[in-house]
Image (cartoon, coloured by chain):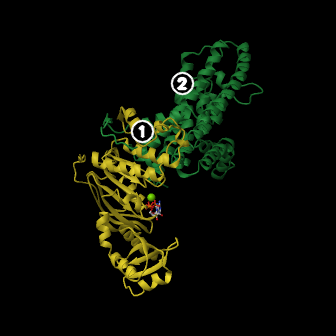
Amino acid sequence: MAHVKAGAATTVVTHHLTKDYGEARVVDNLELKLKAGEIFGLLGPNGAGKTTTILMLLGLIEPTAGSIEVLGLDPSRHPLTVKRRVGYLPDAVGFYDGMTGWENLSFTAQLNRLGNGDVRINELLDEVGLAEARDQKAGTYSRGMKQRLGIADALLKDPDILILDEPTTAIDPEGVAEILTMIRRLAEERGVTVLLSSHLLHQVQAVCDRVAIFVRGKVVAQGAPAELASRGGGPEEVEFNTSSTDDKVRSALGQAGFVKKLEPARIRGNYVARIDRGSTNKLVSALVNGGVQLDGIRRTSDDLDEVYRRYFHMDDQGRD
Amino acid sequence: MIRVVTEATAVRTNEGFGSGWRVVARKEFADHLLSGRFLVLTAVLAVAAAGAVFAASGGIRSVAVDATGVPALFLKLFTVTTDPVPFPLVVFIGFLAPLLGIMFGFDAISGERSQGTLPRLLAQPIHRDEVILGKFVGGLAVVALMLTALTVFVSGIGIFRLGLFPEPTEVVRLLVWLLVAIIYVGFWQALATLTSILVPRAATSAMIAVGFWLVLTLFGSFIFRAAASVLANPDDQVASIRAELLLSRLSPYTLYSETSTVLLDPTERATGLLTAQQVDRAIVSNLSLPQSLSVVWPQVVGLLALTAALFAVAYVAFMRQEVRA
Ligand SMILES: Nc1ncnc2c1ncn2[C@@H]1O[C@H](COP(=O)(O)OP(=O)(O)OP(=O)(O)O)[C@@H](O)[C@H]1O
Ligand SMILES: [Mg+2]
C-alpha cells in the first residue's frame, strides 16, 4: 500500500536553477519536478553537475540563480526543517574512523534528536547487512560496507525524501541488486521520494520511475526510461552467431540497406550488426535467405542505452 | 536479504532547534579524552607540574624559614622556583598551554574533510555554525579539565605535603587565574581551528599553528622591540618602552603573563612601566583582591577580545567555505 507522506504532490521542484563557479556554468537552468513517491534518476557522466545539484537541494551550496522548493520550502531559508526530512547519502561517504558503525549512527540519531534511536539503528544495520559489523570500528570497513552504512545513516531519520549520490558505485553486484530492491520497496511501501544520481545507467534504469539525462549542467532528455527509449529512433545493435563463413554472411547482407555496420565480435563466429530500429526481422530473413546458418541472435544495445550513448557521445564531440 | 522496516520506530522528540552544538561538543569531548594526544599532553603536564611543585616547595621552605606572615604563601606554589627547574608553574603554563589548544584544534575541520564526514554532518538538522562552535567548546572543555586537574593536583600537594592552607582570597585568585589560563588556551585553539579550516592537510595546519606559537613566545619580545624602535623616537627611552609595551600587549602571551603575575602575587602593584614618580607616591602595601582584579581587568578583557576575534575569523571562514572544498 503506497501512501504519500509529504502532502504535496511534488516534493522537489527547481526552476531555472543555475550554478556558476567563476566563468564555468556547472548547472544550467535546471528544471526538475519530482512527484511524491517516485524514484527519479539523475544520470550523467563525471562532472555533469549531479553532486552540485544535490548539494543545492540540501541547501549546502548557494545557487547562483533560480529557485528550489523541497517539500514546499526553500532549503536555503529553512535549512533545518528541510534537513530534518531529507535523508542524504553523499558520494564517497565517510564515517568517523575511531567510532564503531553503531556509534556513528548513534551520533546521527542524536543530531536528529531521535528518541529510542537505538532500536532503529539495530534494525537498519540488520537491513543493510551490517549486523555483524556493528561493533567494528568504521575505519576498518570496506568501501562497500561504508556505503551500506551510509544508506542506513540516510534512512535513520525516517525521511520523506531520500537523496542518494551514487549509491551503488562501490558495491558488489549482488549488493547492488539488494540495495535497489530496498530503494524500490521504500518508495512503494512508505511513499518515500527518492532522487538518486548515477553514471551507471544499466544499474539504475530498472529501478527508476523517471530519469533525467544530465550532461554538462543541462538536462538533455527526461522521462520514463521506456518513453525515452522509444523517442530514440536511432540504429540499434544486435549480435548474432553463425557457423557459416564470413563471405557467406557478407554476401547475404551486402544489399541490405538497413544494415549500417557489420563487424565480427570478439568471439569467433559472432557478428555485431548496427541496424535500423525495428529491422531485426528483416535482418533474420536476409540471413536465412542468403543461406546463412543462423545459430543465435540477441539484441545487445538496450534502447535507453542507445539514448544515453547518443547524448554522451554528443558530449565527447563537444569536447574535441 | 534486505527487509524494509515498515514501522516508523523513530519518534521525534524536542522540536526545538539550536542545541545541536552540544551534541557535537559532547562527541568531540569524548573523542579527545580517548585520544593518544590527550595521554601525551597529560603526561607532559604532569611532569611539568611535578617539577614545578618540587622546585617551588624548596623555594617556599626558604621563604617560610625567613619570615612568617609572608603574604599569599600558598600561591607561591605556582609562582616560585628554585634551581634546577628554570620556570615556575605559571610560566610553564604560559609556554605549554598553547600546545593544548593547538593539539585539540589543528584538525577540527580538516579532519572532517579528510574522513569525508563533513557533507554528512552538515546534512543533519543543525546549523553550520553549531559544528564549529561545538568543536571549539568540546576541545576547550578538555583543556579546562586538564588545567583544573593540574591546579587541584598542585594545590593538593601544597595542602597535604607542605601543610599550606589557602586563604579564601587565594582560592579566588587561583580560580580567576585558571579562567584566564583557559581563555588564553582558547586563543590558541581558535587559531588552530582557523588553520584547520584554511589548510586541508592536518600536518600543515599543525605546523603553522605551532610556528605561530614558537615565534610569539620565543621571539615575541625581540619582534616587539624591533617594531617599537621603528615606531618611536629611539632617543626618547620612555616613549620607545611605552611603544614596545603597547605592541606587546597585542600578544596573548603578554596579556596572560601580566594577568597571572598580578593575580597570583599581591605584592605586584601594576603591570608595565612605572615612572619614578609613580613609584615614589605608591604606598608600599599588598593589593587586595578587588585591587588586583581592577589592575588586570583590561588585560583579561583584551585576552577575551583577541580570542573572540580570532574565533569570529574562523567562524566566517568556515561559513564561507565550500562544503566539498
Ligand atoms: N568548488 C568548485 N569550484 C569550481 N568548480 C567546481 C567546484 N566544484 C565542482 N566544480 C565543477 O563542477 C562540475 C560538476 O561537478 P559535480 O561534482 O557536480 O559533477 P558530478 O556530476 O557529481 O560528477 P561525478 O560523477 O564525477 O560525481 C565539475 O566540472 C567540477 O569541476
Ligand atoms: Mg558527483
Chain A rendering hue: yellow
Instruction: Give me the residue at 45% from left, 44% from top.
Output: A149
Q: Which mark, by number, is residue A126?
A: 1
**Which residue is located at x 41 percent, y 54 percent?**
A165
Who is closer to the viewer here, A217 or A237?
A237
Q: Report the chain shown in green.
A: B
The correct choice, above or below, for B184 with respect to A33 in the image is above
Q: Quadrant of ligand 2?
A: bottom left
Compared to A85, does B288 lie above or below?
A: above
Q: In this figure, which residue is indicated by the disc labeled 2? A: B175
Distance, label 2 to label 1, CA atoms, is: 51 Å
Q: Chain of mark 2?
A: B
Q: Amino acid at mark 1?
A: Asp
Q: Amino acid at mark 2?
A: Leu
Position of residue B285 measured from the top left corner of the image (x, y, whole percent): 61, 21
Q: Quadrant of the N terminus of chain A?
A: top left
